[in-house]
């Protein structure tokens, strides 16, 4: 007699450890890697369907935002930062990738309600594919940042070897937080609307359009407690200052990213059995 895998898992007398749950979850996701790539390809095709410029919007969007922010903050507000376009884009490109991937991950289960109800697959794939599809656009946007840094004469040295590390940590942090929000969004659809407001506040609380040195001393500890401030400062070190990032900031963000990934994965895994009933 055939036994459904989920039913068998519920009747096991020994509860698996959290480490074992994480390991099995990773193994299952890797086994369905082809499905993940198909979802990424579908997201990219859907995003640019009917668009004349298509994937080139990945370059035009940050370029247009950079021009607007440069005019507002360097010409009107007169933020005293030399080579301001490079400084701005060094933070704006990774921030945009974070915001888009987090938003996509948060709605990934609800947006795929049809296949969640009908097909069995490891549901962790949904937020992961949403984050990775946004990462593809992020990598394309980095070519614009590299070109701008060269034009403005930034010395890009061996510090750029740490770029894959920053990207990997950003993915880990976003997948963890996005998975947790995606699980909550299944039960409370207000989560996605709250997130859109939170991202606006979070953006201006992160030193993207301004330097942390310009923040009043009394408020600086509050801004310095922002994990995204640690990450953005690391990107700015690589692309704007042409130097190695602050190791304390990098280490702190690495710790937060790994903790968030574990918490998000476990929380998502605990709630995912009810997704098909709720979406």
Image (cartoon, rainbow, N blue to C red):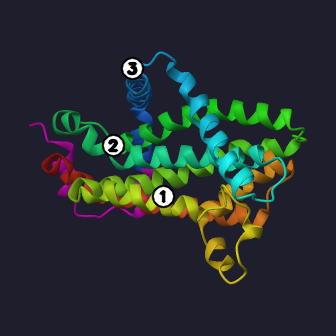
Residue placed furthest toward the left: 1
Q: Can residue 208 be seen in the rendering of this structure? A: yes
What residue is shown at x 91% (from left), y 41% (from top)?
155
Whole-Å distance between the Cαs marked 1 and 3?
Answer: 27 Å
Residue reaching furthest bottom? 218
Residue 72 among those drawn in magenta: no
Disc 2 residue crowd, few under 14, some 14–19, many 20+, Cα 10 Å: many
Residues in magenta, as a range: 1-23
Q: Classify 219 as above or below 71.
A: below
Query: Which image quarter: residue 215?
Result: bottom right
User: Disc number at residue 108?
Assistant: 2
Mark closer to the observer (1, 2): 1
Q: Residues within 10 Å of mark 1 (few under 14, many from 20)?
A: few
Query: Which marked residue is nearer to the observer: mark 1 or mark 3?
Result: 1
| Residue 74 located left or right of residue 157 | left
Residue 165 visible to the viewer: no
Residue 173 spot, x, y in % from top left: 53, 55
Helix, strand or loop status at disc 3: loop
What residue is pinned by disc 1? 200
- Return the x and y of residue 221 as percentages of the image width and height: 66, 79
- Check disc 2 and report its element: helix, strand or loop: helix
Q: Name the residue carrying label 3.
A: 49
> What SS does tag 1 mark?
helix
């Amino acid at each position: 007699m055939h036994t459904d895998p989920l039913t068998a898992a519920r009747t096991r007398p020994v509860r698996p450890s959290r480490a074992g749950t994480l390991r099995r979850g990773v193994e299952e996701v890797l086994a369905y890697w082809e499905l993940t790539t198909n979802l990424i390809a579908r997201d990219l095709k859907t995003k640019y369907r009917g668009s004349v410029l298509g994937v080139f919007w990945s370059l035009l969007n940050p370029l247009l935002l950079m021009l607007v922010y440069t005019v507002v903050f360097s010409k009107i507000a007169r933020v005293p930062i030399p080579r301001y376009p490079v400084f701005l884009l060094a933070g704006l490109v990774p921030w945009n990738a974070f915001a888009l991937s987090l938003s996509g991950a948060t709605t990934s289960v609800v947006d795929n309600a049809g296949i969640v109800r009908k097909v069995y697959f490891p549901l962790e794939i949904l937020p992961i594919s949403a984050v990775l599809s946004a990462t593809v656009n992020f990598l394309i946007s980095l070519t614009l940042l590299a070109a701008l840094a060269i034009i403005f004469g930034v010395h890009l040295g061996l510090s750029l070897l740490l770029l894959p590390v920053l990207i990997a940590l950003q993915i880990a942090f976003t997948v963890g937080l996005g998975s947790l929000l995606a699980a909550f969004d299944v039960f409370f659809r207000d989560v996605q609307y709250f997130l859109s407001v939170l991202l606006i506040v979070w953006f201006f609380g992160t030193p993207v359009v301004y330097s942390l040195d310009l923040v009043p001393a009394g408020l600086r500890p509050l801004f310095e407690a922002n994990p995204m401030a640690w990450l953005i400062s690391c990107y700015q070190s690589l692309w704007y200052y042409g130097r190695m990032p602050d190791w304390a900031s990098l280490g702190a963000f690495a710790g937060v990213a790994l903790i968030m990934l574990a918490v998000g994965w476990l929380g998502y895994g605990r709630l995912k059995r009810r997704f098909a009933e709720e979406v």
